[in-house]
Image (cartoon, rainbow, N blue to C red):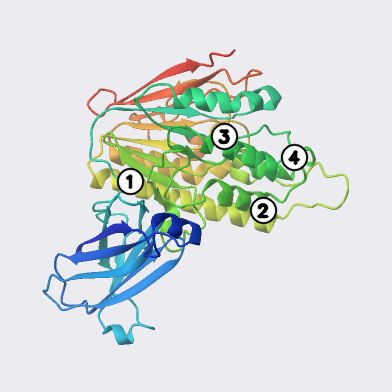
C-alpha cells in the first residue's frame, strides 16, 4: 500500500527585494523575491531528509532534516517571482549523505504556480514511495483536477488556417471564439495549423503561435501531420520531419503543464513522468466531472508514410529507421496516456471521458499505424462503461458516429463498444474556415455531451 508524506503545503509570500524605494528597485533590475513556508502534516518513520527544488527564473534547492512522527515547519528566502515549478523528494538517510542516495519518496507530479506579489500562493505536493508510481496513484490536490460538477463549454476547431484567406482571418476567428460567451472554458485546436502543400517555415509557426497565444481563453493544442510529418514534401520546404516536430514542441509547449492563451490553464503533461519527458503535447485535465485527454496521433498513417517521395534533386531520402522508431515511441506513449486518462477517470469517479486527437483513424489507407491506439481506446472505453467521446479532425468534413458499433475489424477490435461516440470536426473546406464546434459537457445530463456547429460570422 502506498504511503505518503503530506500533503506538504508550500506557501509563497512575495515581497520586494530590499534595495531602497520601489522605483529604485525597479530601475536597479533587482527581481522580486519571496519567502517559502513549508509544513508537513506528519513525517513517516523512513524519512530523515526532505529536499525541495523550486525552478523558475532561477533554480533554488534546499534540504531539511526530518524527525519521524513530528509535524515540522520550515522556511527559506529568495524565491523569484513568476511561474515556478515545485518538486520534492524525501530520503531515509541524513541530509549530509543524500548526494548519491536514492529518494525514498518522490512527488507523483510536480506542481506549477504563478508567483505574483502581493498575492500569496499555496501548492500541495503529494509524495509517494519511490518505485511505486502507477496509473492508480492518488493524485491529491492537483491543480489540473477540478472537483466542480458545473457544466462547461469548450470551443473546438481543427485543420485551420488553410490558405491565404483563412490565414488572414485566423486572428479574428480566435478572437470570436474567445468572446463567444462567458461560459466558454477553453479553446482546443485539433492540429493541422496549415494545409498540406504550404511551407513549414518557423516564421509561419510563429504567426500561428502569436494568434493562439493571444486567445482570451486557455488554448490547448495537439499537433497535426501537416506541421511536421508531411514537411518532407518539396512544396513544404523539404524539411526533416523530426526537426520540425522538435520545433513545434519547443514553440507551442513552452511551459509544461500550462496552456497557451492570455489566461493559463494548468494541465497534467506526460512530460512530467520519467521516460516520457519528450511528450510535452500529451495533456489531460478534469473538469465538469469529465476527464479530457489530448493524445498526439496524426494522419499520414500516424507518420508511417515514407518521406521525400517527391524529391527530384537526389539530396533527400527516406529514413525508415528514424521514421518508424519515432512512430513506435509516440504510439506507445499515446497508449500509456490513454491508460492514465482512464485510470484518473476511475480514481476520480468521473462521469465521462473525452479523448482528443488530430488523426481520423478510419480515413485513408493504410491505417495500420493506428492499430494500437484504436485497440487501447476500445478496450478502455468498454471497461470504463460510461460515456466516452472521441474528437478528431484530419478528414475535414463534420460527422458523428460510433466506429465501434459493430466492433472494428480494420483495427482488430472484435467486440462492439456501445458507449463511445465520435465527432469529426469540420475544417479547411472554404476560403474562410466555415465553422467551429461548441462542445457542451454536463455530467448530470444523459448523455453528458452535446454540441453546436457555430458558423463563422464573416463568411
Q: Dot 3: what SS?
A: helix
Nearer the observer: mark 1 or 3; the answer is 3
The residue tagged 1 is 144
Q: CA distance from mark 4 to mark 2?
A: 13 Å
The residue tagged 4 is 236
Comes first in the chain, label 2 or label 3: 3
Q: Dot 1: what SS?
A: loop
Q: CA distance from mark 4 to mark 3?
A: 21 Å
How would you rate the neighbour count of disc 3 (Cα within 10 Å): few for under 14, some for 14-19, many for 20 or more? some
Position of residue 156 measured from the top left corner of the image (x, y, whole percent): 47, 28
Q: CA distance from mark 1 to mark 3?
A: 24 Å
> In the picture provided, is 311 more to the left or to the right than 250?
right
Q: Residue at x 57, y 17 (%)?
A: 434
Comes first in the chain, label 4 or label 2: 4
Comes first in the chain, label 2 or label 1: 1
Q: CA distance from mark 2 to mark 1?
A: 30 Å
Say if 16 sits above or below 421 in the image. below
Q: Dot 2: what SS?
A: helix
Q: Dot 4: what SS?
A: helix
The residue tagged 2 is 243
The residue tagged 3 is 211
Amino acid at each position: 500500500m502506498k504511503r505518503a508524506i503530506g500533503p506538504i503545503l508550500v506557501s509563497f509570500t512575495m515581497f520586494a527585494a530590499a534595495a531602497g524605494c520601489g522605483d529604485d528597485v525597479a530601475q536597479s533590475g533587482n527581481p522580486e523575491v519571496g519567502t517559502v513556508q513549508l509544513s508537513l502534516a506528519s513525517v513517516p518513520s523512513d524519512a530523515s531528509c526532505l529536499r525541495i527544488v523550486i525552478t523558475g527564473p532561477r533554480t533554488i534547492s534546499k534540504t531539511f532534516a526530518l524527525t519521524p512522527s513530528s509535524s515540522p515547519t520550515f522556511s527559506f528566502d529568495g524565491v523569484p517571482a513568476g511561474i515556478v515549478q515545485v518538486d520534492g523528494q524525501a530520503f531515509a538517510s541524513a541530509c549530509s549523505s543524500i548526494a548519491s542516495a536514492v529518494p525514498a519518496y518522490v512527488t507523483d507530479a510536480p506542481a506549477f504556480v504563478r508567483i505574483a506579489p502581493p498575492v500569496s500562493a499555496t501548492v500541495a505536493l503529494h509524495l509517494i514511495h519511490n518505485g511505486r508510481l502507477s496509473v492508480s496513484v492518488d493524485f491529491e490536490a492537483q491543480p489540473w483536477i477540478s472537483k466542480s460538477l458545473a457544466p462547461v463549454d469548450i470551443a473546438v476547431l481543427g485543420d485551420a488556417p488553410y490558405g491565404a484567406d483563412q490565414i488572414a482571418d485566423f486572428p479574428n476567428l480566435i478572437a470570436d471564439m474567445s468572446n463567444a460567451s462567458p461560459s466558454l472554458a477553453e479553446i482546443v485546436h485539433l492540429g493541422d495549423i496549415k494545409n498540406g502543400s504550404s511551407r513549414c517555415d518557423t516564421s509561419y509557426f510563429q504567426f500561428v503561435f502569436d494568434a493562439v497565444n493571444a486567445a482570451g481563453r486557455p488554448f490547448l493544442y495537439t499537433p497535426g501531420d501537416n506541421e511536421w510529418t508531411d514537411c518532407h514534401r518539396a512544396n513544404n520546404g523539404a524539411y526533416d520531419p523530426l526537426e520540425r516536430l522538435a520545433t513545434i514542441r519547443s514553440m507551442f509547449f513552452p511551459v509544461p503543464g500550462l496552456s497557451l492563451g492570455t489566461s493559463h490553464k494548468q494541465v497534467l503533461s506526460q512530460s512530467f513522468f520519467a521516460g516520457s519527458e519528450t511528450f510535452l503535447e500529451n495533456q489531460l485535465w478534469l473538469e465538469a466531472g469529465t476527464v479530457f485527454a489530448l493524445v498526439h496521433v496524426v494522419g499520414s498513417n500516424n507518420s508511417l508514410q515514407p518521406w521525400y517521395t517527391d524529391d527530384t534533386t537526389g539530396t533527400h531520402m527516406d529514413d525508415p529507421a528514424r521514421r518508424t522508431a519515432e512512430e513506435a515511441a509516440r504510439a506507445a506513449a499515446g497508449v500509456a496516456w490513454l491508460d492514465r486518462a482512464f485510470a484518473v477517470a476511475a480514481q476520480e469517479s468521473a462521469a465521462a471521458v473525452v479523448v482528443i486527437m488530430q488523426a481520423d483513424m478510419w480515413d485513408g489507407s493504410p491505417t495500420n499505424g493506428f492499430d494500437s491506439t484504436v485497440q487501447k481506446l476500445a478496450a478502455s472505453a468498454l471497461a470504463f462503461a460510461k460515456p466516452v467521446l472521441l474528437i478528431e479532425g484530419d478528414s475535414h468534413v463534420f460527422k458523428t458516429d460510433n466506429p465501434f458499433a459493430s466492433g472494428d475489424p480494420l483495427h482488430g477490435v472484435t467486440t462492439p463498444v456501445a458507449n463511445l461516440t465520435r465527432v469529426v470536426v469540420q475544417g479547411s473546406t472554404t476560403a474562410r474556415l466555415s465553422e467551429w464546434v461548441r462542445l457542451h459537457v454536463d455530467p448530470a445530463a444523459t448523455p453528458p455531451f452535446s454540441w453546436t456547429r457555430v458558423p463563422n460570422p464573416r463568411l
